[in-house]
Image (tube, helix red, strand yellow):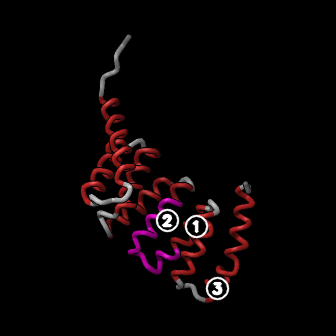
Amino acid sequence: MPTMEQMKHMADVKAEPLIAKLKTDPNNFSLCIAIADLYRSAHQFKEAAEYFNKALAIDPKNVDIRTTMADCLYYSGDVDGALAELDKSLSYNPTHPGTLMNVGIIKLKAKNDVDGAIAAWEKLLKTNPNFEQREAVEHMLAKAKQQAKNKSLPEQKG
């Protein structure tokens, strides 16, 4: 298994000719995405987010790319930046399933906002009844509701 440094080096080598092309064609959306995907697959999330951001400068309403960039921000430690991007995604498409799923995950895991997670996942299930990951969302939702219930119970002294 390669180290993170080795993965970064491999991604840099693969991205180099694409980055050179991008310098001569800076508004090439597909090229930005290709570079971002290279870095993302190598777990170089800050670099990936940089190129997803370049793509979004070309196509700002691309909700799928914005949601993927939010993932990269989250994995690089920028939780608030990730949530801001997801909010922007929802401003373009308020029922986007991937965005709603990620809002719930990040709110629960990074912000301990159980109610926010529940609201996002309930909206996801209501607005996307045939969501292919429905069972996983229902499972996360049930766990979050149990967590909220446990939190609201008064502590017993023993």
> Horizontal placement of 83 versus 128: left or right?
right
Would you say the magenta stretch is mainly helix, strand or loop? Answer: helix
Ranked by sequence position, the earlier of labels 3 and 1 is 3
Residue visible at 36% across and 35% down in the picture: 147
Q: For the residue carrying disc 2, how many other residues have a C-alpha within 10 Å: few (<14), some (14-19), or many (20+)?
A: many
Q: Nearer the viewer, residue 111 or 94?
A: 94
Residue visible at 35% across and 61% down in the picture: 97
Q: Nearer the viewer, residue 103 or 139?
A: 139
Q: For the residue carrying disc 3, how many other residues have a C-alpha within 10 Å: few (<14), some (14-19), or many (20+)?
A: few
| Disc on res. 48 | 1
Ranked by sequence position, the earlier of labels 2 and 3 is 3
The residue at which mark 2 appears reads as: 69
Against 148, residue 106 (above or below) is below
Q: Is residue 101 magenta?
A: no
Label 2 element class = helix
Against 110, residue 100 (above or below) is below
Label 1 element class = helix
The alpha-carbon separation of the residues under discs 2 and 3 comes to 22 Å
